[in-house]
Amino acid sequence: MVIGNGIITGFLKLSLALQSVESTLNQVAEALQKGNAALLSDFFATQVEIYLSPSPRIYSKVQAKYVMQEFFQKNPPISFTLLHKGRSEDLIYAIGSYVSQQGRWDVSFFARFHQGRYVIEQLRFESIGG
């Protein structure tokens, strides 16, 4: 019976982790679809690398929120489509397409499981033209 309870507990933990992965991916995609820097920043790690120009920069969570707010104001989203997602141990990643009237960007992000939730450590916007 103890072994059975251990197996059930293991399955419950796995189920909760998978729900957390899907929930995180869906909420980050929603934030990008809406151009919502506040919602997006809820998922930022304490330090986050953001790539918006020729070179990436590392920002604090608060700074990163303002960087993204400025980006969304200059490039309000028409759409964001999540194209691919994956998971490797404690890391999740996703690739999508962000479209605004000002251009199109391939977007990717990497989030690590930290203190019971996934936090974005890297967010990349690579321009693919207008």
Image: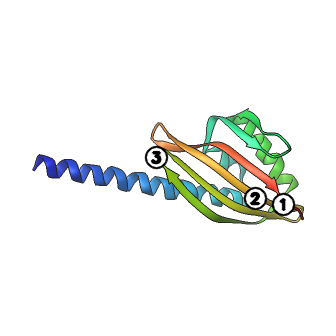
Q: What element carries label 2?
A: strand
- Give the alpha-carbon distance from disc 2 to disc 3, as whole Å: 24 Å
Q: Which amino acid does label 2 sit on?
A: Asp
Residue at which label 1 appears: 128
- Helix, strand or loop at label 3? It is loop
Q: How crowded is mark 3: few (under 14 residues within 10 Å), some or many (20 or more)?
A: few
**Pointer 1 or 3: first along the chain:** 3
x and y percentages locating residue 81 in the rendered image: 68, 66
Give percent across and percent down for residue 110: 61, 47
Residue 45, quarter of the rendered image: top right
In the shown orientation, is residue 14 left or right of residue 107?
left
Q: Name the residue under label 2.
A: 106
Residue 44 appears at what percent x and percent y? Answer: 63, 41
Camera-side residue of 125 and 45: 125
Label 1 – label 2 distance at C-alpha: 7 Å
Q: What element carries label 1?
A: loop
